[in-house]
Amino acid sequence: MKKDFLLLRHHSTEELTALLDLAAELKAKTKAGQPHPLLAGKTLAMIFEKSSTRTRISFEVGMHQLGGKALYLNSGDLQMGRGESIADTARVLSRYVDGIMARVYAQSTVDDLAKWADIPVINGLSDLAHPCQIMADLLTIREHKGSLAGKTLCYVGDGNNVANSLIWGCIKLGMRVRMACPTGYDPDETTMAWAYENGDFACSPDMLAMASGADVLYTDVWASMGQEEEQAAREAIFAGFQINQAVVNAAARDCIVMHDLPAKKGQEISEEVFEAHANVIFDQAENRLHAQKAILVHLMQ
Ligand code: CP
Ligand code: NVA
């Protein structure tokens, strides 16, 4: 049966750990300049309904390094943008390429692509989830902290796609998760219910209490792609939810600070804290490449 990568909730702790191990192995090969053409001759179609820097480039370069090819497809340029159904698009792509990565608004779009395609489908971000980002984040935390189990991650800000996937990924890997979100901006309800039941999890607007003793502080933009019209209102609502020196002081002394990028410095993170932790933040961005190569090999080899 073909495999997909749509939501972290679908994957076991063992599978996610194996993917992180494979990512580390492929990263070492890449750094050593050792060729690893594991997907020679294979093609990945990349459909984008939204903008992207990291996701587009890391998937495209990743396919190149694996000996394959990636096609950048802006959804507005496809017949899909004029109303061709997802079902038909998925069946056509299945006749040409070996895998699909899609960045979409509705989670149902990527789910339907997976339902109708005979080839693996990867979620490159939806309004609900950003699973590829979190695989890169887990790889980064493991590199900087040595292990994941027992470490505490505190996320500050909007309970968005990144927050939802962090909850699934971190808890499955044995981490403690603390969410500091303004009232009314909590993560997805089903995700939180699962986290309370299955992990060491707390969610509260009391940011300093949530950040207390954290090994990892993490934030993301206050307004995500598709919420541009809410930007001004959100700036008022989220004003207190910034990772700045006071939040860093509440966390563990050796805490790392993470951001999936792009960042709005001065909003969700202060310029000072961003620059002081830039090495980890850009490791995170680099690790998109290595983590996604592992996902591509796992699904498409
Ligand atoms: N973090 C992330 O997904 O970045 P892009 O939007 O640039 O792909
Ligand atoms: N939450 C952000 C993540 C960007 C990578 C968004 O969806 O725009």
Image: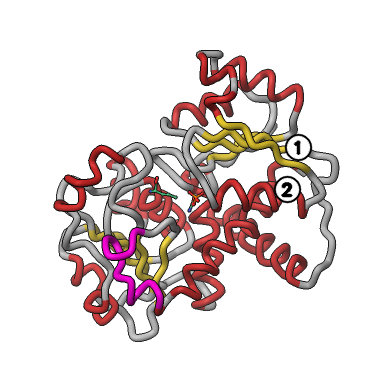
Color theme of the render: secondary structure
109 relative to 228 in the view: left or right: right
For the residues labelled 1 and 2, say whether their Cβ atoms are less than 8 Å apart.
Answer: yes
Q: CA distance from mark 1 to mark 2?
A: 8 Å
The residue type indicated by label 2 comes to Met
- Report which quarter residue 220 is drawn in: bottom left
Residue 63's disc number: 2
Secondary structure category for the residue under label 1: strand
Taking the image as drawn, is residue 200 in sight? no
Residue 216 is inside the magenta segment:
no
- Placement of 262 over or under 116, stated as above or below: below
Give SS at disc 2.
helix
Q: Give, as a single range, the part of the protein colored magenta.
A: 264-275
Query: Residue at horizontal 19%, vertical 71%?
Result: 208
- At x 14%, y 52%, the residue is 236
Residue furthest bottom in the image: 253
Judging by the rendered image, the residue that carries numbered circle 1 is: 43
Could you tell me if residue 261 is visible in this image? yes
- Marking on residue 208: none
The answer to whether 117 appears left or right of 206 in the picture is: right
**Within-10-Å neighbours for mark 1: few <14, some 14–19, many 20+:** many
Image height of 159 relative to 239, above or below = above
Amino acid residing under circle 1: Thr
Give the residue drawn at x 45%, y 27%. Answer: 108
Is 271 contained in the magenta span?
A: yes
